[in-house]
Image (spheres, rainbow, N blue to C red):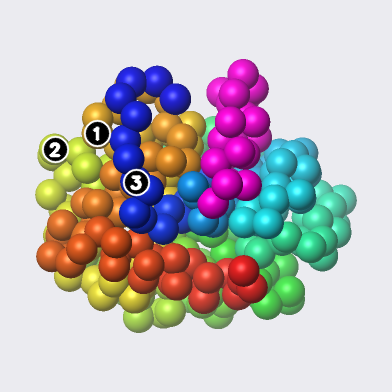
């Protein structure tokens, strides 16, 4: 952990979207795992981004009481998802500690896979989630209308819109379907008044906190690696927007995550 060490000992820290299996943590992954084992972090969901990464996600948390994982193929890797890949995901999702299908979705900002491949992979994984009755972790960037329409057509309305970045209209549309909104470091960014407004207007019962580490670090760590413990900054900002104590906010966000992923802790 670089920079000043924050004290979030009075908060129930929950990171519903982490990538600690990524290479950015190769030098100090054990220290992050120790925080989970010591209950400094009360709950962590390690999120898969392709078949191999989903396997790594499982291996990262398999021995952790407060650690769980998801398996899925990110829109960036959609072109590589075939029938064998779907079978591999289904096998992974049958394991203990598997709590969601994800991260899946659409990303028309970077377009690292063609739109056609993204739609195909998204729909196939939505069907898999419906078959297994698991929540989905949805990545959306520059594709909110298309993602909403695709989910609506599929009819599987259980999960979280990760790193929510649309306006209040789409926040309400997804909430009305039954989704949670994933709120991370960007809520602390000076120019992100729109996301703070969304958090003020959407009921706390429909929010979960996350980091997306090693990405999207909160203020004061912008430009550095994000990590699960920094979710405390996110919780504090959500609490400020809701005008409640950070402690009470953290407890409610913990309850939301436990309910969303049907966890027994």
Whole-percent x and y of residue 63?
76, 49
Q: Is residue 162 left or right of residue 263?
A: left
**Quick one: label 3, few (<14), some, or many (20+) residues within 10 Å?**
some
**Where on the picture, by quarter, is residue 197?**
bottom left
Depicted 203 relative to depicted 104: above or below: below
Cα separation, mark 3 vs mark 1, equals 15 Å
Q: Quadrant of the C terminus?
A: bottom right
Whole-percent x and y of residue 82?
79, 49
- N-term-proximal mark, 3 vs 1: 3
The reply to whether the C-beta atoms of the residues labelled 1 and 2 are less than 8 Å apart is yes
| Residue wearing tag 1 | 219
- N-term-proximal mark, 1 vs 2: 2
Q: Residue at x 33, y 21 (%)?
A: 3
| Residue wearing tag 2 | 190
Judging depth in this view, the residue of 260 and 249 nearest the camera is 249
Q: Quadrant of the N terminus?
A: top left
**Quick one: label 1, few (<14), some, or many (20+) residues within 10 Å?**
some
Cα separation, mark 2 vs mark 3, equals 22 Å
Instruction: Describe the element under mark 1 as helix, strand or loop.
Output: loop
Q: Is residue 242 left or right of residue 86?
A: left
Q: Residue at x 84, y 53 (%)?
A: 88
């Amino acid at each position: 952990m670089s920079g000043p060490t924050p004290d979030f000992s009075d908060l129930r820290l929950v990171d519903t979207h982490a990538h600690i299996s990524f290479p950015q943590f190769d030098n100090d992954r054990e220290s992050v795992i120790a925080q989970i084992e010591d209950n400094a972090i009360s709950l962590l969901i390690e999120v898969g981004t392709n078949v191999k990464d989903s396997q790594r996600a499982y291996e990262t948390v398999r021995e952790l009481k407060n650690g769980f994982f998801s398996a899925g193929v990110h829109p960036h890797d959609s072109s590589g998802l075939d029938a064998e890949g779907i079978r591999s995901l289904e096998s992974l999702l049958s394991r203990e500690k598997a709590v969601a299908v994800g991260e899946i979705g659409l990303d028309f900002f970077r377009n690292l896979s063609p739109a056609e491949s993204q739609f195909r992979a998204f729909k196939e994984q939505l069907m898999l989630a419906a078959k297994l009755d698991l929540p989905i972790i949805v990545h959306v960037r520059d594709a909110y209308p298309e993602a909403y329409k695709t989910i609506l057509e599929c009819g599987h309305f259980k999960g979280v819109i990760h790193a929510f970045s649309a306006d209040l209209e789409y926040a309400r549309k997804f909430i009305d379907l039954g989704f949670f909104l994933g709120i991370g470091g960007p809520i602390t960014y000076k120019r992100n008044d729109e996301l703070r407004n969304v958090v003020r207007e959407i009921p706390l019962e429909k929010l979960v906190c996350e980091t997306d580490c090693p990405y999207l670090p909160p203020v004061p760590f912008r430009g550095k690696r994000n990590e699960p413990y920094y979710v405390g900054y996110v919780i504090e900002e959500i609490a400020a927007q809701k005008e409640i104590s950070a402690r009470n906010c953290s407890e409610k966000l913990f309850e939301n995550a436990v309910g969303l992923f049907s966890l027994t802790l």
